[in-house]
Amino acid sequence: MRTAPEVLAPAGNLEKLKVAVLYGADAVYLGGQKFGLRMASENFSYDEILEGVAFAHEHGSKVFVVLNGFLHDKDLDEIPEFLELLEVAKVDAVIVSDLGVISTVKKHSNLEIHLSTQASCLNVEAAKFWKDQGVKRVVLGREVSLTEAKKIKKETGIEVEMFIHGSMCMAYSGNCVISNYTQGRDSNRGGCAHSCRFGYEMDFSSVDESKIQKIQSYFMSSKDLEGIRLIPEFFEAGIDSLKVEGRMKSPHYAGTISKVYREAVDFFHLEGHYNTEKIFEWEKELRKISHRDYTSASLISPADESSIYDERENEIKDYQVVGVMQEVVQNEFCLVEVRAAFFPGDTLEVLPYKGSVKTGDISFISDMLGRNVEKTKPGTLVKIPWIEGVDKLNLIRRKITS
Amino acid sequence: MKFSLPVKSREEIKLAKEYGISEVIISPSLLSRFGTIDLNNALFLADVCKEYEIISVLEWDALFTNDSFEKVLKGLSDFNFSNFDEIRVQDPGVYHWCLSHTKNKIQLNLETGNHNLECISSWISYSNDRLSKVVLSHEIPKDKITTYTSFLNIPVELMGVGRILLFYTPRRLLTSYHVNPEKQVEVEASSEETPHSGFKVLQNYHGTFMFNPKDQFLLDQMDDIRDSGVHWLRLDLRFHQLSELLPKIMSSVKTRETKSLKEEWPTKLFAGFFRVNKTDILFKKLKNKVLVRDDEKYLGVVLDVIKKEKMGIRLNTSKYKLSLGDSIELRTPEGKVKNYKVDEMTNSQGELVQSANSGDIIFMKHVGGVSIRSAVYLS
């Protein structure tokens, strides 16, 4: 039997880490307060890394820490101390893109090194180079197809990780500095302003054969990657890890992608085929989280113009997370941390760690003082009726109606 | 100080020689992201360089996924690399391949990232003395360049004038707009969401590129460049009229008078990050620092508040537990600090509890001024 690839989920904070792990991620990746590419993300304090690693390991999952900024000398001076802490915390690997950081990691620790997609490793020769640098795993550039990835793995023996889901840089990763020059924020040290998602007025008047003069367009914005239908191809290519983008995204996102890809990978691994109606269910679930239009990008053949998301930045969201289970008292009530409004009489969906979605009729809602609540407010704790089969940290959602 | 210049024709090489340029960069379209000539023409120009006794550099800076890379290698099966003095590479895969399959000296373009000495040194040491120079990023300021040149054992190059590449994708982003995908096309793009306008967007065989509206121009800082130990300055005129600008540039370098040259330059100009790079200074504004967890004595977070009545707290740490009689400090998102001695707490079922651990939700009397998301610490 083929080895199943790891499902690797983003963890923007400790809550999302726990959610991803509980919903089935084999591994999560997270950032500390520095050195990564998401300075606006909540990220992890050192104690949170310790707790996150302990929690993940307790549940059989791994933790990778990103140090994947294109760091400057002053940043590099601070890395050794952080590496020491990461070793104490027993993180499973660090994700790095800069050769100076790789060299520093090797000098100051025994941590396993994964090459970030930010380094745009695209071919066999590049993978050989990075292997020579002591890299154990490469996260390939999102321009690489599954067939190419298979070859890279076969010819180099290096572990191969590929993105399977999430938002995508339109540029070769690491090859975009728009924010640096236009916003004064280093995109490759965590300050990306997402300039590729802006609307641009394009002037074609200098193009001879063009039938248009000026047009308003989102020509640099990419659709989101979705690889759920390609699970057999990922197995066949021998890909070691299936990575999902999205440390800035919600716990709902972290939970859903972990659960869906866990189930899909397990299904193919156990059954040996992919002829199942479940694919439609998984796709349906992936449409309940915020997303742009989906594309398989370059996983099969190079992404063409159909991969452009030529619309105003406006993620499609059919479902809204209205709360997170904080406590479940059997046969009595569930204590919910409210994230969005819901009402007595609503039917809510609860996403369990395994299996089908549970539904619950909300016959009452009460606040901390036991008073009835007519409409919940985000940032409150409420009690709702107990729903069979739900657990702590399960996500509760509601279909958005127009 | 020596000068490097991308060229496309015999006439341009002749002009380069006339104006004292030491090396020319020859960019075939198969290998170079902005190349416009075929491989035979590139070989021909390398011969012309021999005639004029000028260093010829083959530019191979396009990025390739594995299939494209293999196709390129097939196209190069009979290619005579030895016709060129040096090869300029950027992709680590091309670097690796050239080190093992050619005998040329190699120039490594490190313009994308590579912003620390450890990194640059590591790239150099991998080559086993095959590198003739490295091209540094435009984002490295002069004080850092000075440090690097004093440590590095090979020459460094900077772009003295030329377009700044902001964005490179293999996807052809203009094809949707009835543009012939086989032809090189350049348009201008502007956005109301950025204060800058007039970004040049180029689509060619290798994909789509966006450039900064202002060209980099360092010719008015020649003394600083020399003092920083830079050996090579690239005059990247590949998107401009070389025959028109090169004489003016070299005259300007000689007379140290750049005003008229700047006025005549076809685009706006700036010095990029040569003087200073503060692109991390805004990071501290990207999130509320008060909400960043301070590990020292952290307990948890306030999840709900009913003013003057009750507040609900979730304990988030396994490092400490909260017990009756403990003094706690509550730090609000606005930065206010409130202190409180815990004299009573209950669980969600209203039962009195003596202590609480990580993951527990507990309820206690509301402390005036404390709002949701306030962080809870042991005093």
Image (tube, coloured by chain):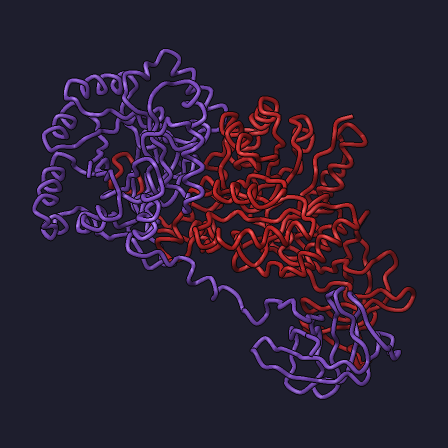
Residue B270 x, y percent position in the rendering: 24, 53
Tell me if residue B112 comes above or below residue A371 in the rendering: above
Q: Which chain is red?
A: A
The answer to which of B288 and A35 lies nearer the viewer is: A35
Tell me if residue A261 comes above or below residue B328 in the rendering: above
**Image-quadrant location for residue A315:** bottom right
Residue A344 x, y percent position in the rendering: 78, 71
Q: Is residue A88 left or right of residue B262?
A: right
Rendered-image quadrant of the C terminus of chain A: bottom right
Residue B329 x, y percent position in the rendering: 67, 79
Q: Residue at x 85, y 61 (%)?
A: A387
Q: Residue at x 82, y 66 (%)?
A: A327
Residue B262 in view of the camera: yes
**Image-quadrant location for residue B37:** top left
Residue extending farthest to the top is: B78
Q: Is residue A132 left or right of residue A184?
A: right
**Image-quadrant location for residue A5:** top right
Q: Which residue is drawn at 74% across and 50% down?
A: A56
